[in-house]
């Protein structure tokens, strides 16, 4: 009888020990680094200026969730909003401006997750001797700006109006990466892009800060879509972006907290 009672007691203790270990396992952790039962593809439509940081976040998210593949569509926020409204299959939308997020009818409540500021980008060595915004009104300078419907273009327009400058652009680009490419290839003397883009370009361009940049600080909202093909994966990815791990990647890329 004693042996049987002892065996039952030992079995109960073992069961409790295993349960306790289960509560401390990575899958049950409250850190948010991994989520159970996730699978399939998470399709993320994201502003072009998020290319570097979101590519890294996608890799980190896949590592934390081995059953998931993250696929990105990077472009101008206005173009992405239009694609979503036309029925393009997407799970998450991250916009470079609230205006473009507001245009999307198929979305859950957005969350602002970062801010970004404009900066002047010039080729290495600044051969045209660009010094500030006034150079954007010089017809002898080759200038690239984002188109007005693109968040970086709308922000630039707001800055120019605030300081009373009428720019003379030689090209209007459909996303900020295209404008930056013009600079890195030496096709223009300067472009107005985000400071995160200058940082991402590293040794390909130089950045010139200007005090008027605080006239148009862009806020970036992110949201899951109500018709997301992978709703669970969409929510998990947004949660990851908003987590401490996500914030660390975005801060390293030059984004500011909202």
Image (cartoon, rainbow, N blue to C red):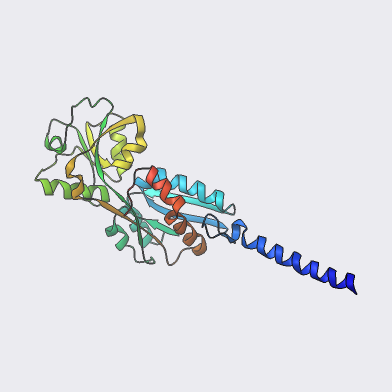
- Which residue shows up at 55% across the image and 56% down it? 34
Looking at the image, residue 64 lies above or below residue 199? below
User: Which is more toward the observer, 123 or 141?
Assistant: 123
Q: Which picture quadrant has residue 110?
A: bottom left
- Which residue shows up at 24% across the image and 52% down it? 149
Extreme-front residue of the structure: 2
Res. 198 visible in picture? yes
In the picture, the quarter occupied by the N terminus is bottom right
The spot of residue 43 in percent (x, y) is 47, 55
Looking at the image, residue 155 lies above or below residue 39? above
User: Which is more toward the observer, 119 or 191?
Assistant: 119
User: Is 198 left or right of 241, judged from the image as shown?
Assistant: left
- Which residue shows up at 50% across the image and 56% down it? 42
The spot of residue 251 in percent (x, y) is 38, 46
The spot of residue 106 in percent (x, y) is 38, 66
The spot of residue 21 in percent (x, y) is 66, 60
In the picture, the quarter occupied by the C terminus is bottom left
User: Is 247 left or right of 178, judged from the image as shown?
Assistant: right
Q: Which picture quadrant has residue 82?
A: bottom left
Looking at the image, residue 189 lies above or below residue 240? above
Res. 89 visible in picture? no
Q: Which picture quadrant has residue 87?
A: bottom left
User: Which is more toward the observer, 133 or 83?
Assistant: 133
User: Is 176 left or right of 4, judged from the image as shown?
Assistant: left
Extreme-bottom residue of the structure: 1
User: Is 163 left or right of 10, judged from the image as shown?
Assistant: left
Counting the numbered discs, the total is 0
């Amino acid at each position: 009888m004693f042996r049987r009672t002892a065996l039952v007691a030992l079995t109960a203790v073992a069961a409790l020990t295993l349960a306790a270990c289960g509560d401390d396992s990575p899958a049950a952790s409250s850190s948010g680094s991994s989520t159970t039962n996730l699978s399939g593809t998470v399709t993320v439509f994201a502003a072009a200026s998020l290319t570097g940081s979101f590519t890294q976040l996608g890799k980190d998210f896949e590592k934390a969730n081995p059953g998931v593949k993250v696929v990105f569509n990077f472009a101008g926020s206005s173009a992405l909003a239009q694609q979503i409204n036309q029925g393009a299959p997407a799970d998450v939308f991250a916009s470079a401006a609230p205006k473009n997020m507001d245009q999307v009818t198929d979305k859950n409540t957005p969350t602002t997750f970062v801010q970004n500021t404009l900066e002047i980008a010039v080729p290495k060595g600044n051969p045209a001797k660009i010094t500030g915004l006034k150079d954007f009104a010089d017809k002898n300078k080759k200038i690239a700006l984002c188109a007005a419907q693109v968040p970086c273009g709308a922000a630039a327009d707001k800055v120019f109006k605030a300081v009373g400058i009428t720019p003379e652009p030689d090209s209007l680009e459909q996303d900020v990466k295209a404008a930056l490419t013009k600079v890195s290839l030496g096709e223009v003397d300067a472009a107005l892009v985000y400071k995160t883009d200058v940082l991402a370009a590293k040794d390909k361009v130089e950045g010139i800060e200007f005090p008027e940049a605080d006239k148009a600080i862009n806020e970036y909202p992110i949201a899951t879509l109500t018709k997301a093909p992978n709703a669970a994966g969409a929510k998990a990815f947004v949660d990851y972006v908003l987590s401490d791990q996500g914030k660390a990647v975005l801060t390293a890329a030059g984004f500011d907290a909202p």
